[in-house]
Amino acid sequence: AQKVTQAQTEISVVEKEDVTLDCVYETRDTTYYLFWYKQPPSGELVFLIRRNSFDEQNEISGRYSWNFQKSTSSFNFTITASQVVDSAVYFCALRGDSWGKFQFGAGTQVVVTP
Amino acid sequence: EAGVTQFPSHSVIEKGQTVTLRCDPISGHDNLYWYRRVMGKEIKFLLHFVKESKQDESGMPNNRFLAERTGGTYSTLKVQPAELEDSGVYFCASSQGGTGGEQYFGPGTRLTVT
């Protein structure tokens, strides 16, 4: 069975602070994909990143960075120098290579105050 | 190229009424997925169409939910009769080709059952 755990329900930070969102996953598939999506107050899901299970390189995109560690089954996401526009719910998700549906985590609400 | 569209964006109905949600996938995408997020919980898979056929409907909560995909184009999700616990945001996603293809999400339909 596949499972994604986002243990942090809500994180509140002051603008310019860094924030790290944890994601731990379980799967028996040897090939799988991990994703992060952002859901701003407007409600749509915004794709942030996809990593496959064979690529453990960390990635940085502007103020966003991701740390993928297969040894601990984690795919953590860090926002550096947070801004008010980063306030949203962030979802981590898992998808196997042989099945199309996503397994989402419960989401982490990030609140950034000025 | 138009993205995935969903209609309506918001629906408020009374318990016992019927509601039909519509999803128009990206043109040419054979795969269409429905997901649901109940308030504060994870986004859960409902079902997966490949063209007009149901590939996986393991996430459908009960027989009050009926999904169809006419001619392999748009899809509808009917809830009849609606219950309070059906309230949430219903997302549709589509992808091209096999199950490993990138999924593009629509903006969601927020359903409120009173």
Image (cartoon, coloured by chain):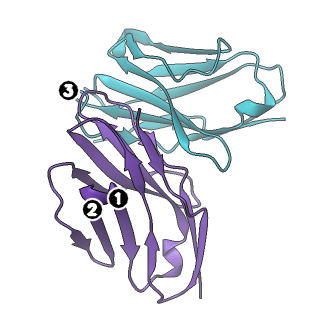
Is residue B3 or residue A96 the one in the foreground? A96
The numbered disc on residue A68 is 2
> At which x and y percent is residue B16?
83, 19
Q: Which residue is mark 3?
A: B97
Q: Secondary structure at mark 3?
A: loop
Q: Is residue A66 above or below residue A5?
A: below
**Would you identify the image quadrant in which residue A102 lies?**
top left
The purple-coloured chain is labelled A
Question: In the image, is A43 to the left or to the right of A33?
Answer: right
Residue at x-position 37% and y-position 67%: A77
> At which x and y percent is residue A20?
44, 74
Amino acid at pointer 2: Phe
Asked if labels 2 and 1 touch by Cβ distance under 8 angstroms, the answer is yes
State the CA–CA distance, disc 2 to disc 3.
27 Å
Q: Which residue is mark 1?
A: A74
> At which x and y percent is residue B108?
54, 41
Frontmost of labels 2 and 3 is 2
Q: Secondary structure at mark 2?
A: strand
State the CA–CA distance, disc 3 to disc 1.
29 Å
Frontmost of labels 3 and 1 is 1
